[in-house]
Structures are given as C-alpha cells and as structure tokens.
Image (tube, rainbow, N blue to C red):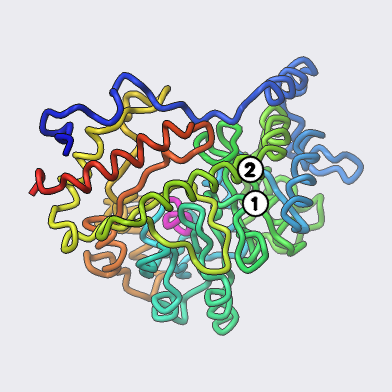
C-alpha cells in the first residue's frame, strides 16, 4: 500500500500540477461585450416612467436576455438583477413582507438565504434540512408554521431540487408564499419541470462560480403578472415611479438600483446558449466519479432525489466515522494532502470542504439578535409578537452534517480531463484504503 502524503508519502497529484480553472467564458462572450462597449450604451435603464419609452425596463440587451431566459425555462416573466442577493431581497419585498412577519428559512446555505427577510423587518425562523438531500425538510417546515408565518424561502442546494410538491402543499394549506433560492440549479428538474419555476418566485444566480456567469448577476422568474411588476419596480427606484405608472399598492415600494448592465446581459445571452452543454459535461463527470466511488462503506456520494435532475453545483459525500474508524477531520486532511489547488485559486488550496457552511443561525447577527440599529430590530420590536430562537440544537441534521457527516468538492466541473477525475478518485481510494494510518 502507498504511504499517505500526510505521513510523508508521495501524493496522488503533485501540488504544482494545478487542476484546470473553471471558465465557461469564451470568444462569444468577448465579442458580445466588445459589441456593447463599442456602442457606448453600457446601461440603458432610466429610473422614471414613460409608457412610450421602454428604458424603465432596461436596454435592448437586458430585455432580449430576459425574453430568452423566460422562453428557455417556460416562465411568463424573467427579471434580471445585479445579484441573486438583490433578487432575493426584491422577491421578499414583492410578496408584501412586513415587520413582524416570519419567514421559514434553511440553516444550510449562503447567508442571504436566511437574512433576506430582515430587510423588511421580518424574522427568519429556521427549519431543519433533509439528511440525504440537504434541502428544507417538509416535516420540519410544517412544524415551524405559526400565525405569523408569511412565506417559505426554500433553497435548491448544490443543484438538488427541494421537495416542491410537499413544500407547495404546506404553503397552500397555510396561505403562504414560496420563494425559491435556485442560485445553484439552472437547468435542474423536478418531476419534469424546471427547478426555480415551481414557486411563486424563483431566483437564479450568475455569480462568477456558478454554472454560467457574468461575474455577478441574477434572473428572477415568476408567472404572476403583479409580482413581476413589483420586482421590476423594486429593481429600479420604485418610489420615483409608482405614481406615474399608476401603481396603487405601494407596500415595499422603496426601490433600489438592482439593475443589470448591457455588457453583462450581452454576455449572459451567450452563456445561456452554453448552459445545457456545461450541465451535460458536469453530469457525465459525476456519473464517472459516483460509479468508481460506490465501494467505500462510510464514505459515499450522497444520493439524488428520485424523479429529479440534479445539476451538481457541488458534489457531496456523506461520511460515517463509525464505519471508517477515523474522525472526519483526519480523513479530510489526508485527502487534501493528496491533491492540488486549481488554477487561479491557488491561495484557496484544494477545492474541498468539510461540510458546506456553518449553520446560519450560529452567525453573530442571530446569536446577538442585532440587525438594524442597536436595539434588536426586528427580533425585539413592537411589531414582532413571537420569540426568536437561534440556540444550538434547533436544527440537529444541519449541525450534524456540518460537524461530522459532509464532505464537499467541485472537482467535477467542466474542463476536468479524465486524468484529472482519476486523480480525484484515486485520492479518495488511497486515503480510504490506508485509513488505518490515520487511526
């Protein structure tokens, strides 16, 4: 047996032999960006209403991109934004969230998936996640509903769709809105329908490390005409527009500048054409890894939900110390020692992690219940009649995944060669087969 690199052996891959960077940007995007730059019209948005002038809705590239995205995903409206963070904030404003409301959120995602309600004075209530699929557990969601609940903010984590049928049934039962953070699942499917289109509002991301990207950016989708209008208003200085546009419901019509640029939109149009091919390559790589990593009890690829298309923003393994006989931390450090960083991300080290993020409610904003101002708003205010609970233990599955059970990586992305994949697989097997060295 080969000696583990962490104990002085030769690593599976020389640390200087960097893995390829993930870069889906090519000449098509370059030409599109140059075309817009040479036009001189880098943005065409105007924060004012004129029914004869479409400039309130952006320039020709923005409007064309939105139309193409809507057609691709079979939705009535697609509203571009400058980030998925902006998209989530706008979505919660659009549904009419108010101070004192509660929104059920996940503990296991990027923090905005839980903090977005705070911008409207609403209080996040955490439900736990599913142990195999990592999305909100419908039973935990049902248990979290109170008379103050206004919405459920679900996350399609790692490219895996949430259980839309179960979540939507809960929402219908309690008259709640559902907003989907679908940042990580473009082209993913749930029972034959695109994830992100199964809720009242879905939010996709074009951030630089997503499946397709423009550096930053987002697309928010809905089939509801009224919600689409409110999203467009919040995106572009709503308070200056509502009177001239004849809008009578001005709740949350304090607008922002969440606007997408013409350059980014032109690039996004080209990126959208590549989406299916990039996802197909990702799925091919995942199938190759999963097939060759199915024989390691205690260290196995997480399953995909039946009747879905998982598009793997990240690839998760589930770790069981009782079966391997080695603490996850030691196993993980040994894995890291066998592999190399990726080009352009050398300072980040090997692109692999224990867990994903720490449970969001462990952040200081929740532990100290300080958000806006120094007096505890919105957690402690005249508007909120509940009791905000963020102590350790409220979401035991998420905590267990973070502390003991999950290992993630993204070394299955397009651009990885068969040799690159074989090195990743080889590292998994080498550490597993020699784990006695770590005990």
Residue pointed to by mark 2:
81
For residue 151, say whether it is visible: no
Which of these two is toward me, 211 or 127?
Answer: 211
Residue 284 is situated, as x and y percent measured from the top left of the image, at 54, 46
116 drawn magenta:
yes
Question: How many residues crowd around disc 1 within 10 Å: few (fewer than 14), some, or many (20 or more)?
Answer: many
Residue pointed to by mark 1:
220
Which of these two is toward me, 256 or 116?
Answer: 116
Labels 2 and 1 touching (C-beta < 8 A):
yes
99 drawn magenta:
no
In the picture, which quadrant includes the N terminus?
top left
Residue 387 is situated, as x and y percent measured from the top left of the image, at 32, 73
Farthest-out residue, top: 38
The answer to whether 398 is drawn above or below residue 80 in the figure is: below
Name which residue lies at 73% across and 47% down: 69
Highlighted range, magenta: 111-118
Name which residue lies at 32% across and 56% down: 295
User: On the rendered structure, is 13 left or right of 179?
Assistant: left
Which of these two is toward me, 44 or 332?
Answer: 332
Q: Which one is earlier in the sequence, the residue at label 2 or at label 1? A: 2
Name which residue lies at 46% across and 64% down: 122
User: On the rendered structure, is 383 left or right of 239?
Assistant: left
């Amino acid at each position: 047996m080969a000696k583990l690199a962490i104990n002085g052996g030769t690593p599976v891959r020389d640390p200087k032999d960097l893995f390829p960077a993930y870069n889906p940007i090519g000449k098509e995007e370059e030409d599109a960006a140059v075309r817009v730059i040479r036009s001189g019209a880098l943005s065409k948005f105007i924060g004012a209403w004129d029914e004869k002038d479409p400039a309130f809705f952006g320039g020709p590239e923005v409007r064309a991109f939105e139309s193409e995205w809507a057609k691709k995903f079979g939705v009535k409206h697609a509203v571009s934004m400058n980030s998925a963070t902006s998209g989530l904030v706008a979505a919660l404003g659009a549904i009419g969230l108010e101070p004192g409301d509660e929104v059920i959120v996940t503990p296991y995602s990027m923090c905005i998936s839980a903090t977005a309600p705070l911008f409207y004075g609403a209080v996040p209530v955490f439900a736990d996640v599913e142990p195999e699929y990592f999305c909100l557990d419908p039973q935990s969601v049902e248990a979290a509903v109170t008379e103050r609940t206004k919405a459920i903010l679900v996350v399609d984590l790692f490219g895996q769709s949430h259980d839309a049928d179960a979540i939507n049934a809960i929402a219908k039962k309690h008259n709640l809105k559902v907003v989907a953070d679908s940042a990580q699942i473009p082209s993913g499917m749930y029972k034959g329908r695109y994830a992100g289109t199964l809720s009242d509002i879905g939010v996709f991301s074009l951030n630089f490390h997503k499946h397709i990207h423009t550096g930053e950016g987002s697309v928010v989708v809905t089939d509801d005409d009224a919600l689409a209008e409110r999203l467009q208003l919040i995106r572009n200085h709503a308070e200056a527009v509502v009177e001239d546009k004849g809008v009578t419901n001005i709740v949350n019509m304090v607008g922002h500048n969440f606007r997408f640029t013409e350059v980014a939109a032109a690039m996004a149009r080209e990126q959208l054409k590549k989406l299916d091919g990039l996802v197909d390559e990702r799925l091919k790589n995942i199938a190759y890894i999963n097939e060759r990593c199915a024989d390691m009890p205690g260290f196995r690829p997480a399953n995909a939900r039946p009747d879905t298309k998982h598009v793997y923003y990240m690839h998760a393994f589930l770790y069981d110390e009782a079966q391997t006989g080695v603490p996850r931390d030691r196993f993980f450090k040994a894995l890291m020692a066998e592999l190399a960083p990726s080009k352009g991300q050398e300072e980040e080290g090997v692109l692999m992690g224990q867990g994903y993020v720490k449970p969001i409610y462990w952040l200081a904003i929740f532990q100290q219940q300080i958000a806006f101002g120094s007096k505890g708003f919105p957690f402690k205010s005249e508007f909120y009649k509940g009791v905000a609970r963020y102590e350790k233990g409220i979401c035991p599955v998420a905590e267990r995944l973070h502390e003991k059970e999950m290992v993630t990586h993204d070394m299955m992305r397009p651009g990885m060669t068969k040799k690159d994949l074989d090195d990743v697989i080889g590292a998994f097997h080498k550490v597993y087969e020699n784990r006695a060295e770590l005990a």
